[in-house]
Structure formats: structure tokens, C-alpha cells
């Protein structure tokens, strides 16, 4: 459990997934995943792979992401990359833009790899130390912006997104946005994880716990 460390000492892993659709609960699957490590103000690519989802990719998804059935035909299934990805998630704060979306898909994929009972809890709980959503953080720090989707935040901070709606490009851009948001938090007197959770919980009635930085489902409209 995190014990009030400053941002510079926190190991973050910024994750982005591309999928066959909008809901893991409806059986949609991951088609691409990327993880970028952020620590001490530095950004490092850590993991990237296309994933064979074991089902067809709808045409509108291919139009959005450029990922086609042909591209993933020879890609590894999730179980083949699960271990390598887990190594990057372990012991780090899981960060994503609309984190609940990415978390839900990876949780469902890991549950298929290592089947669990409902009592066993979320399979990602054993890996990540906490969860942080850049949509929710932006809502607290950038109240003046009319939108806080990834394009809007990248424009605000002057971040260039290479290969939009692809996992690696979006993860790198989100990592740079994360650093800019944390710098803004520090300018507002928020210097540690505990203070950041307090900022995010303020006015919500939420009790502070290690995953209180996760978004609600309604964040999706701003999270794309």
C-alpha cells in the first residue's frame, strides 16, 4: 500500500488498450495493448503488442483504429503475452485515460488466463498498487477546459499524439499528459499521493482508499 510518497518516487505504468468494442462485460476483447513506465519525470516504453482477440473486429472499430482482422490473425492471444505485461504492471500505479475502461478489459483478459471465483476479487488487484485516471485528475485541475478527452488535454499541454487510437501512441501521449497534470498539481500545493487522493475525493463524499482515483463509468464520454 502506498504511504504518502512524493510523485517523483512513485512508479507509474500508463496503459492503453484497443478493443473489439466498448464493453468487456459484453464479451469484447483486447486487440492491442501498450504500457509506458513513468518515474522520476522520465517516460520509457515498456511493452507493446497486437493481440489476437479470437473474434471478428467490427468494421467501425477497424475504421477508428486501423486494426483489422488480417493484422491480428498471426498476433499472439492474450494468454501468450499476459506474463510479460504483468511484469510491467506489478508494483506500479496503473494509469490510463478513462482508467476504468482499460482496467476492465485487462481484468477480464487476466480472469480468462487465471480463472477466479467472485470471492477471489479482481485479478489485477494482485499486480497494481493503485489506480489513477487522468480524466478525473484533469477534471479537478483543469476546470476551465470544456472537454478533457485525450485530444483536448494534448492540445492544452502541447503534446503531439503519434498514431491516435493505437495503443502505443495513446499510451505515450497519456504519459506526457500525466507528467503535465502532476506538475499542475504541485503548482496547486499537491505534492504527494495522499494529497492527490484527497484532491480527487474532495467534494465527492468518497472515503479515501487506494483506488479512489478511479473514474466512474460516466467518464467515458470525456475519456476517448
Image (cartoon, grey):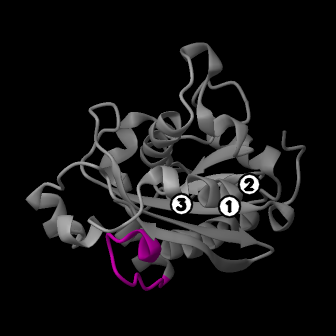
- Residue receiving disc 1: 88
Secondary structure of the residue carrying numbered label 2: loop
Q: Residue at x 33, y 75 (%)?
A: 164
Residue 162 horizontal/vertical position (percent)? 39, 84
Residue 194 horizontal/vertical position (percent)? 81, 44
Decide whether residue 169 is among the magenta residues.
yes
Q: Where 126 falls versus 4 (above or below)? A: above
Between residue 184 and residue 40, name the one nearer to us.
Answer: 40
Residue 76 horizontal/vertical position (percent)? 42, 62
Q: Residue at x 62, y 39 (%)?
A: 124
Res. 211 in view = no
User: Where are the magenta residues, as a range?
Assistant: 158-170
Image quadrant assignment for residue 188: bottom right
Decide whether residue 205 is among the magenta residues.
no
Q: Where 8 falls versus 44 (above or below)? A: above
- Mark 1 crowdedness (10 Å alpha carbons): few <14, some 14-19, many ≥20: many
Image quadrant assignment for residue 66: bottom left
User: Which residue is outermost to the top?
Assistant: 119
C-beta proximity under 8 Å, tags 3 and 2? no
Between residue 17 and residue 74, name the one nearer to us.
Answer: 74
- Mark 3 crowdedness (10 Å alpha carbons): few <14, some 14-19, many ≥20: many
Q: Nearer the viewer, mark 1 or mark 3?
A: 1
- Residue receiving disc 2: 92
Image quadrant assignment for residue 153: bottom left
- Residue receiving disc 3: 15
Residue 100 horizontal/vertical position (percent)? 47, 42
Amino acid at each position: 500500500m502506498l504511504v504518502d510518497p512524493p510523485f517523483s518516487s512513485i512508479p507509474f505504468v500508463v496503459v492503453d488498450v484497443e478493443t473489439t468494442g466498448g464493453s468487456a462485460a459484453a464479451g469484447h476483447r483486447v486487440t492491442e495493448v501498450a504500457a509506458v513506465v513513468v518515474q522520476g519525470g522520465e517516460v520509457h516504453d515498456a511493452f507493446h503488442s497486437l493481440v489476437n482477440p479470437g473474434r471478428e473486429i467490427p468494421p467501425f472499430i477497424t475504421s477508428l483504429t486501423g486494426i483489422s482482422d488480417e493484422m491480428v490473425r498471426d498476433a499472439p492471444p492474450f494468454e501468450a503475452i499476459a506474463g510479460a505485461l504483468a511484469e510491467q504492471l506489478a508494483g506500479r500505479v496503473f494509469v490510463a485515460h478513462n482508467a476504468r475502461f482499460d482496467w476492465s478489459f485487462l481484468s477480464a483478459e487476466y480472469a480468462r488466463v487465471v480463472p477466479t471465483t467472485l470471492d477471489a476479487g479482481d485479478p489485477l488487484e494482485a499486480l497494481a498498487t493503485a489506480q489513477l485516471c487522468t480524466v478525473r485528475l484533469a477534471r479537478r485541475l483543469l476546470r476551465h477546459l470544456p472537454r478533457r478527452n485525450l485530444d483536448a488535454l494534448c492540445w492544452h499541454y502541447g503534446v503531439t499524439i503519434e498514431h491516435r487510437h493505437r495503443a502505443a501512441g495513446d499510451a505515450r501521449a497519456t504519459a506526457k499528459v500525466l507528467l503535465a497534470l502532476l506538475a499542475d498539481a504541485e503548482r496547486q500545493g499537491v505534492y504527494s499521493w495522499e494529497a492527490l487522493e484527497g484532491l480527487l475525493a474532495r467534494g465527492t463524499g468518497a472515503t479515501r482508499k487506494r483506488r479512489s482515483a478511479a473514474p466512474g463509468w460516466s467518464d467515458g464520454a470525456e475519456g476517448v
